[in-house]
Amino acid sequence: MVRSRGARVRAVVVVAVAAALVLGVVVMGTLWHLGNRQVAVPTLAEREAHLRRAIDWVVANESKLMSEPNSALWHMLDRSAEITRDPELTRIVERARQTFFEASSNQSPWVRMMKPGADYVRQLVDPSQLDDYQAAFLSAITCGETEM
């Protein structure tokens, strides 16, 4: 039986698509398996070592961090300092609090991430400039007072 050129091209395309699907299933199965394999729970000593390395990194990079008035970053470091009670981390967070969040000139609604209840200038925020998570945080820290 002699196939037309169009039929041969269609057959090649079908085989190529089938091969791609099989390869995709094999790759996805492998990734799923690797991502869901059993691993040992880190020991307390391992977790403490990782925490110490993270705090040491913050201390070593303090000057770089102090040029970053990112409220979310400082909120996370503040919570970490509160939970760990690490004196170095607490000192750095307090320095950031004084530098970025205690100034009366900071009237951004984001200041409330570090100073809940702080006064801020009610401003219109362009929702197209915010990611969804940012809009959710802003609504939460201003109790929905900031117009979107």
Image (cartoon, helix red, strand yellow):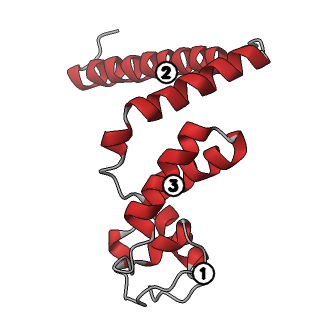
Quarter holding residue 102: bottom left
Closer to the N terminus: mark 3 or mark 1? 3
Crowding at dot 2, Cα within 10 Å, few <14 / some 14-19 / many 20+, comes out as: few
Q: Where does residue 14 sit, x and y in percent of width and height?
A: 40, 23
Crowding at dot 1, Cα within 10 Å, few <14 / some 14-19 / many 20+, comes out as: few
Q: How far apart are marks 3 and 1 (CA)?
A: 18 Å
**Image quadrant containing the C terminus:** bottom left
Q: Looking at numbered disc 1 in the image, what kind of residue is underneath it? A: Gly
Q: Looking at numbered disc 2 in the image, what kind of residue is underneath it? A: Gly
Q: Is residue 48 left or right of residue 118?
A: right
**Is the residue under label 1 in contact with that under label 2 (CB below 8 Å)?**
no
Q: Nearer the viewer, mark 2 or mark 1?
A: 1
Q: In this view, does 122 lie to the left or right of 79?
A: left
**Image quadrant containing the N terminus:** top left
Closer to the N terminus: mark 2 or mark 3? 2
* Picture layout, residue 71 above or below residue 66: below
Which residue was labeled with disc 2?
24
Residue that lies at the very extreme toward the top in this rendered image: 1
Judge whether residue 125 can be spotted in this image.
Answer: yes
* Picture layout, residue 51 above or below residue 82: above
Q: Residue at x 44, y 63 (%)?
A: 98
Which residue was labeled with disc 3?
94
Q: In this view, does 35 lie to the left or right of 7?
A: right
Instruction: Indicate which disc residue 117 carries.
Output: 1
Instruction: Indicate which disc residue 17 carries.
Output: none
Element type where label 1 sits in the image: loop
Q: Which residue is drawn at 60% across and 74% down?
A: 116
